[in-house]
Image (spheres, rainbow, N blue to C red):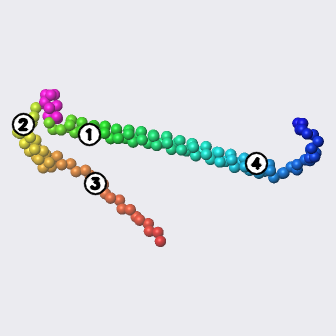
Amino acid sequence: MRRFPQQNFNHGVRREHDARAFKRQLVMLVCGLAMVGGFVVATGQHFKANRYGYEGEKLNAERARLIEEHQQLILQINAATAPASLERAALEIGMQPARPSQINRARKQAATERATPETLQVAPVAPKKSRKRSVAY
């Protein structure tokens, strides 16, 4: 590169090379890259936290919906097993209500079955084995 004027007094002077300057620049570059990397990681964590927050809200809404559905199903089960609906369903398939004489007869029959020795069955009992315990001192 040509400079004008060429007759200046210091055109032959050379600057000395600073050996520590390269090391300082390298340290500054590494520190800058570490900071940029930290910012990138922090940004990634921030976006993940936001995404998890939205997913948590979706799960809470789904949980509330499922709890409501569960309560509706319990109400349907209670309505289906209510005595009035059971009686209606029994009449639809041709069943008839029990007469009082049938109920008393069943009670008497159950009472006599419990009292007779033929109906009582006793399971055989195996003798207990004695265990020897070892005592450690």
Determine which quarter of the picture holds residue 110. top left
The residue labelled by disc 1 is 74
Please report contact status of discs 1 and 4: CB closer than 8 Å, yes or no. no
| Lower position in the chain sequence, tag 1 or tag 3 | 1
Which residue position holds label 2? Answer: 99
Q: In the rendered structure, are the residues bearing label 1 and label 3 in contact, judged by CB atoms less than 8 Å apart?
A: no
Q: Nearer the viewer, residue 34 or 3?
A: 3
Q: Is residue 103 visible?
A: yes
The answer to which of marks 4 and 3 sits earlier in the sequence is: 4
101 or 47, which lies in front? 47
**Residue type, label 3:** Val
Residue 56 is covered by the magenta coloring: no
**Mark pair 1, 3: CA separation:** 45 Å
Q: What is the C-alpha distance between the residues marked 2 and 4? A: 102 Å
Evaluate if marks 2 and 4 touch, with contact meaning CB atoms under 8 Å apart: no
Closer to the eye: label 2 or 1:
1
Give the mark nearest the N terminus, 2 or 4.
4
- Nearer to us of marks 1 and 3 is 1
Q: Which residue carries the number 3 mark?
A: 125
